[in-house]
Amino acid sequence: TGDLKRPSYSIPRGTISAVLFTYLVYNLLAFLMCATCNRILLQKDYGFLRDISIFPPLVTVGIYAATLSAAMSNLIGASRILYALARDDLFGRALALAKKTSASGNPVMAVILSWLVVQVVLFSGKLNTIASVVTTFFLLVYATVNLACLALEWASAPNFRPTFRYFTWHTCLLGIAGCCVMMFLISPVSASASLGFLLLLLLALHYLSPSSTWGYISQALIFHQVRKYLLMLDVRKDHVKFWRPQMLLMVQNPRGSARLIDFVNDLKKSGLYVLGHVELQDLDMLPSDPLQPQQDSWLSLVDKLNVKAFVSLTLAPSVRHGVRQLLFTSGLGGMRPNTLVLGFYDDEAPQDGLARHPAFTSAHEEVPLGFPPLRAPTTPKLLSAREYVGIVADALKMLRNVLLARQLESLDKAWELRRAASPPPTIHVWPVNLLRPDSARYADTCSLFLLQMACVLNMARAWRRARLRLFLCVEAGTMPHAQEEKLRQLLKDLRIQAQIQLVPWDAITRLHWQTCRGPPGGPAEEEEEEEGVVNFPTNTTQVSDEYVCAANKLVLEQSPAPAVRFLYLPRPPADTSLYPLYLHQLELLTRGLGPTVLVHGVSAVTSTQL
């Protein structure tokens, strides 16, 4: 095929013509022999044609000519195929010797290697055995060619347009079935050995072959099947029993977010995971799309970090507009992000986590990805505090759950989860709104979502050794044991294993009432939940810094120190002028707590029906 000018034209016609001509000659010869020879002669004497021929030497010449012709054509054809495999590095260095050619370009070493293989096969000593093995391999080649054509047809690739007018997937399937049946009819042992050898070649091809530029049929088949199943994934049939987190993690620079990316990968629980990035540029002012060169770097990052994530990049005049775009457009069909994850907005200097990540340090090499250096501590941020809180508010308006992750880059998951010390690492869960003690409830939508997130993390393989600790804040005279029993029954109904710890916080709430406008049970507690969204009043941030620092100290005093904490994230105030104060109080609440995730849920995610 490598020497033909038009292989697609010549091979089908040449093959069909040769098969038809040979078929006629062999059938004519068989008919003439049956008409002139008896059964005993045909069974016992392989050289009987010389005895009945008009010119006996002609038979001997024909045998030698056919043998040499077949041997030379197969030797040359096999060596060409071997040379092509070596040239394309399909099996790595295993075939490096076959690359060598003569001055005129003939694959001399490939011919010699093919001849040596033939000599080894001849040591079997029986031509009939060799014939059955060779026939089996030829049939296996024909079956795989039909399989390749069948895969291309089923993949519905637009560029697969065979010129053979009688081609259909039925002929491919018939060809595969016919070849496989004939293989086992000729020799079951040879057929089984050939299939085993084929599997070994496929394994070698999978592990030794470099990335190719001629495409993968598997990708076309996967695309075809994924499209079909995405159309079948009907969002109208969603049910809370089968809910799973589908994450959109916003990343400004992956160099400072390596551990956060890995943490969210554990938190997604087989759901959709998208890494989002906003580039602050105007396409009207640029000669081309600046995101295309970055795509490969992000995909390489996903491969290096070994996370199961997609990448979604966008251009926008501001980060807030870019996040809106990604929330609207990320995903496809029934697979769309339902949870937005953001890093926390604080004044801490970013650290280059990629430079210390095992995926990059194990090879003793610099980080090869095309990401810019991290922002210097003195460099102004691309995002203001008001805009950051606005992003949270936008996500909640769009009925997306929100997670704010603080100090996740300090989480050494390998050390926390593999240390031999007892007791095992813990995950602390605070399902009460610490900034609104007058509305402390443990069974509202947001609290249950927070509990679900902590449970999902605990279900991840890397976190199964960790233990959940659920903190129940109680006041004197409120029957704490009854509250504990009620919460324990809720955990039992939700099939969540967690240790409940009672935390007195009378002194903390006393600070709140000193700065609040009314006693417990007043209008501040009269809240309503509509469509799974808790409508907090606008005085959410009207608590003193003294109270927030006391709540922070309460959380910090619970020992031993956990691997990660989950805290209730209050809804941003309706008054946008309070956004900076809201963010300031979140910073006070989480200061010094180590790895912390603030969670606000807007949709029901738990069910007792399973």
Image (cartoon, helix red, strand yellow):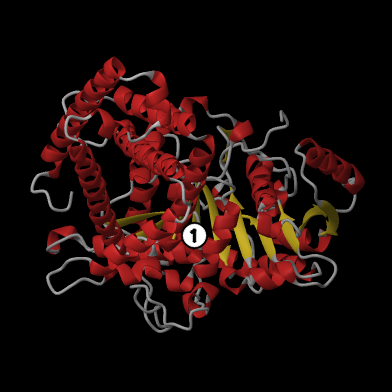
- Residue at (58% x, 68% y) in the render: 408
Provide residue 192's location: percent of width, then percent of height: 52, 40
Q: Position of residue 364 (x, y in %)?
A: 48, 83
Q: Left or right: where does residue 525 sit relative to residue 137?
A: right
Q: Quadrant of residue 365?
A: bottom left
Residue at (38, 44) in percent of width and height: 218
The three-letter code of the residue at mark 1 reads: Leu
Residue 21 figure quarter = top left
Q: Who's the residue at 77% across and 44% down the image?
A: 496
Say whether residue 362 is left or right of residue 554: left
Reading the image, the residue beneath label 1 is 342
- In the drawing, does residue 178 fall left or right of residue 36? right
Q: Is residue 599 left or right of residue 484?
A: left
> Residue 426 at what x, y percent from top left?
76, 62
Q: Secondary structure at mark 1?
A: strand
Above-or-below relation of 133 to 559: above
Q: Is residue 358 visible?
A: yes
Front one among 563 and 66:
66
523 or 184: which is nearer to us?
184
